[in-house]
Amino acid sequence: MSDVSLMVNGKRVSGAAEDRTLLVHFLRENLGLTGTHVGCDTSQCGACVVHVDGKAVKSCSMLAVQASGSTVVTIEGLANGADLHPVQAAFKEHHGLQCGFCTPGMIMTATDMINRHPEGLDEATVRAELEGNICRCTGYHNIVKAILAASKTMSKGSKGKAKQAA
């Protein structure tokens, strides 16, 4: 057993975990953060995507002990209280979900994607970067629409903040 200490969704947490415990299982079983889903345990589906130190990571491909000392954001930590994150709001508005199983991973992947492309995204880039996330329900059309809408909102927001700062 190893001690794992993380900053998760803005809170310092710690717990004991076997050395072979995957981050996804530590989040779900030790911390009760069940929004991060286990879809395949082989890093194929993307349902388990979280942000580790600001980058999208498939938490079924990382050991909890490897993440110790890191800052982790899960789907539960994305919204600001009752205010949805712009990507969550766009998924809701554009019906970027069906059963919802893949949605947390899609939203976390999309958020990372938008953060890495602050100038905005085009459809081809979104589709290419979603390659590691599987949805068996929607056919991706509304997911792509939602990500493009969120990208547009967030790039407008960042331009506005830049103007205010100047």
Image (cartoon, rainbow, N blue to C red):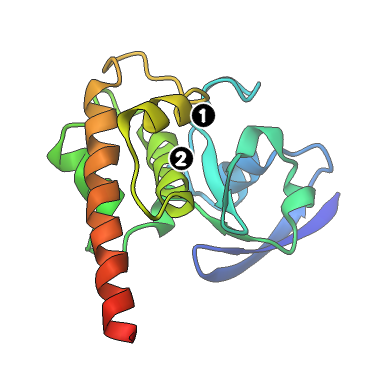
Q: Residue at x 84, y 43 (%)?
A: 19
Give the x, y percent position of residue 15.
Answer: 71, 59
Q: Tell me the amino acid under the disc marked 1.
A: Gly
Say if residue 16 shows up in the picture.
yes
Q: Residue at x 40, y 41 (%)?
A: 110
Residue 109 image label: 2
Judge from the rendering whether residue 16 lies leftward or rightward of residue 46; answer left or right: right
Labels 1 & 2 near each other (Cβ < 8 A): yes
Q: Residue at x 51, y 29 (%)?
A: 46
The one nearer the camera, 63 or 86, is 86
Q: How many marks?
A: 2
Q: Which numbered disc flags the more N-terminal residue, 1 or 2?
A: 1
Residue 3 location, quadrant: bottom right
In front: label 1 or label 2: 2
For residue 108, above or below residue 80? above
Q: Tell me the amino acid under the disc marked 2.
A: Thr
For residue 60, above or below residue 2? above
Residue 139 location, quadrant: top left
Question: Which residue corresponds to mark 1?
Answer: 46
